[in-house]
Amino acid sequence: MSVIEQTNLLIKGDEFRMECLTVARTLALPNWYLAAGFLRNAIWDHLHSKPEITPLNDIDLVYFDTEDLSHDTELRYQNHLNSALPHINWEVRNQARMHLNHGHSPYQSTEHAIAHWVEVPTCVGVHLGVDDQLTFCAPFGLEENWSLNVALNPQFPQPDVFTQRVHKKNWLTIWPKLVLEEVNQASIQMLE
Protein backbone atom coordinates (compact mmCIF):
# COMPACT_ATOMS: atom_id res chain seq x y z
CA MET A 1 0.00 0.00 0.00
CA SER A 2 1.37 3.42 -0.92
CA VAL A 3 1.96 6.18 1.62
CA ILE A 4 -0.84 8.20 0.01
CA GLU A 5 -3.25 5.26 0.42
CA GLN A 6 -2.15 4.74 4.04
CA THR A 7 -2.62 8.44 4.81
CA ASN A 8 -5.99 8.46 3.07
CA LEU A 9 -7.18 5.51 5.19
CA LEU A 10 -5.78 7.07 8.36
CA ILE A 11 -7.59 10.39 7.88
CA LYS A 12 -10.85 8.88 6.60
CA GLY A 13 -10.87 6.62 9.67
CA ASP A 14 -10.45 9.56 12.05
CA GLU A 15 -13.90 10.90 12.99
CA PHE A 16 -12.53 14.07 14.54
CA ARG A 17 -10.41 15.00 11.54
CA MET A 18 -13.17 14.20 9.07
CA GLU A 19 -15.56 16.40 11.05
CA CYS A 20 -13.04 19.26 10.90
CA LEU A 21 -12.51 18.79 7.17
CA THR A 22 -16.26 18.69 6.53
CA VAL A 23 -16.82 21.92 8.44
CA ALA A 24 -13.83 23.62 6.75
CA ARG A 25 -15.24 22.64 3.35
CA THR A 26 -18.44 24.61 4.06
CA LEU A 27 -16.47 27.85 3.69
CA ALA A 28 -15.68 26.97 0.05
CA LEU A 29 -12.39 28.87 0.27
CA PRO A 30 -10.02 28.91 -2.70
CA ASN A 31 -7.08 26.51 -2.59
CA TRP A 32 -7.67 25.53 1.07
CA TYR A 33 -6.09 22.89 3.30
CA LEU A 34 -6.12 21.91 6.94
CA ALA A 35 -2.39 21.90 7.42
CA ALA A 36 0.68 21.36 9.55
CA GLY A 37 -0.03 19.53 12.83
CA PHE A 38 -3.51 18.52 11.70
CA LEU A 39 -2.00 15.98 9.30
CA ARG A 40 1.51 15.59 10.73
CA ASN A 41 0.30 14.67 14.23
CA ALA A 42 -2.21 12.14 12.91
CA ILE A 43 0.60 10.23 11.22
CA TRP A 44 2.97 10.49 14.19
CA ASP A 45 0.23 9.40 16.62
CA HIS A 46 -0.53 6.39 14.42
CA LEU A 47 3.14 5.41 14.21
CA HIS A 48 3.40 5.66 18.01
CA SER A 49 0.24 3.55 18.46
CA LYS A 50 -1.36 6.23 20.60
CA PRO A 51 -4.82 5.14 21.76
CA GLU A 52 -6.06 8.76 21.72
CA ILE A 53 -5.11 11.64 19.50
CA THR A 54 -2.57 14.13 20.75
CA PRO A 55 -4.46 17.39 21.40
CA LEU A 56 -3.81 20.09 18.83
CA ASN A 57 -2.96 23.62 19.99
CA ASP A 58 -4.93 24.85 17.01
CA ILE A 59 -6.13 23.75 13.61
CA ASP A 60 -4.58 25.67 10.77
CA LEU A 61 -6.89 26.34 7.86
CA VAL A 62 -4.86 27.91 5.08
CA TYR A 63 -6.16 29.20 1.75
CA PHE A 64 -5.12 31.52 -1.08
CA ASP A 65 -7.14 34.56 -2.12
CA THR A 66 -5.39 37.51 -3.76
CA GLU A 67 -8.68 39.43 -4.03
CA ASP A 68 -9.22 39.82 -0.27
CA LEU A 69 -6.13 40.13 1.90
CA SER A 70 -8.01 41.44 4.93
CA HIS A 71 -7.21 40.03 8.36
CA ASP A 72 -10.86 40.79 9.25
CA THR A 73 -11.98 38.31 6.60
CA GLU A 74 -9.78 35.63 8.17
CA LEU A 75 -11.35 36.40 11.55
CA ARG A 76 -14.84 36.14 10.05
CA TYR A 77 -13.99 32.69 8.68
CA GLN A 78 -12.45 31.74 12.02
CA ASN A 79 -15.62 32.83 13.86
CA HIS A 80 -17.74 30.75 11.48
CA LEU A 81 -15.62 27.68 12.25
CA ASN A 82 -15.67 28.41 15.99
CA SER A 83 -19.48 28.55 15.85
CA ALA A 84 -19.65 25.22 14.03
CA LEU A 85 -17.06 23.44 16.21
CA PRO A 86 -16.60 25.57 19.36
CA HIS A 87 -14.36 23.05 21.14
CA ILE A 88 -11.58 23.70 18.59
CA ASN A 89 -9.09 26.55 18.42
CA TRP A 90 -9.13 27.47 14.73
CA GLU A 91 -6.48 29.62 13.05
CA VAL A 92 -7.35 30.80 9.54
CA ARG A 93 -4.68 32.40 7.37
CA ASN A 94 -4.75 33.62 3.78
CA GLN A 95 -1.40 32.54 2.37
CA ALA A 96 -1.61 35.28 -0.29
CA ARG A 97 -0.50 37.73 2.42
CA MET A 98 1.60 35.57 4.74
CA HIS A 99 4.85 36.13 2.81
CA LEU A 100 4.88 39.58 4.41
CA ASN A 101 5.19 38.02 7.88
CA HIS A 102 8.19 35.95 6.83
CA GLY A 103 10.11 38.31 4.55
CA HIS A 104 9.65 36.09 1.50
CA SER A 105 8.68 36.92 -2.05
CA PRO A 106 4.93 36.61 -2.64
CA TYR A 107 3.66 33.05 -2.61
CA GLN A 108 2.01 31.77 -5.77
CA SER A 109 -0.43 29.35 -4.12
CA THR A 110 -1.20 27.69 -0.82
CA GLU A 111 1.06 24.79 -1.81
CA HIS A 112 3.90 27.23 -2.49
CA ALA A 113 3.40 28.82 0.94
CA ILE A 114 3.31 25.45 2.71
CA ALA A 115 6.65 24.61 1.05
CA HIS A 116 8.21 27.52 3.01
CA TRP A 117 7.36 26.28 6.51
CA VAL A 118 10.11 25.50 9.02
CA GLU A 119 10.19 21.69 9.30
CA VAL A 120 9.74 19.23 6.44
CA PRO A 121 7.06 17.15 8.26
CA THR A 122 5.08 20.32 8.98
CA CYS A 123 4.94 21.19 5.25
CA VAL A 124 1.75 19.17 4.74
CA GLY A 125 -1.96 19.70 4.34
CA VAL A 126 -5.16 17.88 3.45
CA HIS A 127 -8.22 19.06 1.50
CA LEU A 128 -11.67 17.44 1.37
CA GLY A 129 -13.27 17.84 -2.03
CA VAL A 130 -16.99 18.10 -2.75
CA ASP A 131 -16.75 14.47 -3.91
CA ASP A 132 -15.45 13.51 -0.43
CA GLN A 133 -12.02 12.70 -1.88
CA LEU A 134 -8.93 13.75 0.07
CA THR A 135 -6.16 15.67 -1.65
CA PHE A 136 -2.81 15.98 0.07
CA CYS A 137 -0.24 18.74 -0.19
CA ALA A 138 3.24 17.54 0.70
CA PRO A 139 5.99 19.37 -1.20
CA PHE A 140 8.61 17.07 0.33
CA GLY A 141 6.43 13.95 0.13
CA LEU A 142 4.35 12.24 2.81
CA GLU A 143 7.10 9.63 3.14
CA GLU A 144 8.97 12.15 5.30
CA ASN A 145 6.16 12.08 7.87
CA TRP A 146 5.91 8.30 7.84
CA SER A 147 9.70 7.98 8.29
CA LEU A 148 9.51 9.83 11.65
CA ASN A 149 12.48 11.97 10.58
CA VAL A 150 12.21 15.62 11.53
CA ALA A 151 14.31 17.68 9.19
CA LEU A 152 14.80 21.38 8.70
CA ASN A 153 13.26 22.71 5.48
CA PRO A 154 16.30 22.60 3.15
CA GLN A 155 14.96 25.33 0.87
CA PHE A 156 14.42 27.87 3.66
CA PRO A 157 16.60 26.77 6.59
CA GLN A 158 15.99 28.48 9.91
CA PRO A 159 17.94 26.35 12.40
CA ASP A 160 17.24 28.49 15.45
CA VAL A 161 13.50 28.62 14.79
CA PHE A 162 13.52 24.86 14.08
CA THR A 163 15.22 24.09 17.40
CA GLN A 164 12.96 26.42 19.39
CA ARG A 165 9.83 24.89 17.85
CA VAL A 166 10.90 21.28 18.53
CA HIS A 167 11.76 22.20 22.12
CA LYS A 168 8.71 24.40 22.82
CA LYS A 169 6.27 21.89 21.32
CA ASN A 170 7.86 19.04 23.30
CA TRP A 171 7.86 16.75 20.26
CA LEU A 172 10.56 14.37 21.50
CA THR A 173 8.59 13.65 24.67
CA ILE A 174 5.21 13.29 22.95
CA TRP A 175 6.61 11.18 20.08
CA PRO A 176 9.85 9.57 21.34
CA LYS A 177 10.45 7.62 18.11
CA LEU A 178 11.09 10.84 16.19
CA VAL A 179 14.58 11.23 14.79
CA LEU A 180 15.87 14.81 14.64
CA GLU A 181 18.14 15.91 11.86
CA GLU A 182 21.29 17.46 13.26
CA VAL A 183 21.10 21.21 12.85
CA ASN A 184 24.17 22.63 14.58
CA GLN A 185 25.85 22.03 17.89
CA ALA A 186 24.38 25.08 19.64
CA SER A 187 20.85 24.11 18.60
CA ILE A 188 21.29 20.50 19.72
CA GLN A 189 22.50 21.62 23.16
CA MET A 190 19.33 23.66 23.55
CA LEU A 191 17.28 20.47 23.23
CA GLU A 192 19.21 18.60 25.93
Image (cartoon, rainbow, N blue to C red):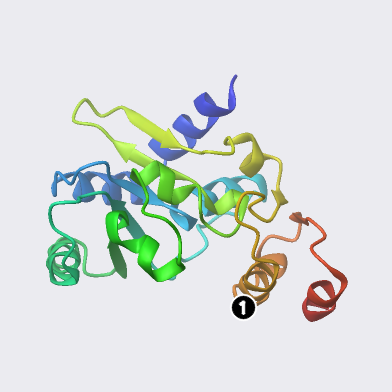
Q: Is residue 59 visible?
A: no
Q: Is residue 137 above or below residue 70?
A: above
Picture residue at 20% right of the left edge, 50% below the top: 65
Picture residue at 35% right of the left edge, 50% below the top: 34
| Residue 133 in the image, given as x and y percentages of width and height | 31, 27
Q: Secondary structure at mark 1?
A: helix
Q: Nearer the viewer, residue 89 or 143?
A: 143
Look at mark 1 in the image and give the residue it sits on: 168
Picture residue at 61% right of the left edge, 71% below the top: 165
Instruction: Give the quarter of the image for residue 181.
Output: bottom right
Q: Is residue 181 above or below residue 75?
A: above
Quadrant of the snapshot with the C terminus:
bottom right
Label 1 sits on what residue type?
A: Lys
Q: Is residue 185 visible?
A: yes
Instruction: Give the quarter of the image for residue 160.
Output: bottom right
| Residue 27 in the image, given as x and y percentages of width and height | 14, 49
Instruction: Give the quarter of the image for residue 118.
Output: bottom right
Q: Is residue 26 above or below residue 183?
A: above
Q: Nearer the viewer, residue 152 or 169?
A: 152
| Residue 35 in the image, given as x and y percentages of width and height | 41, 51
Q: Is residue 97 left or right of residue 169?
A: left
Quadrant of the snapshot with the N terminus:
top right
| Residue 69 in the image, given as x and y percentages of width and height | 18, 61
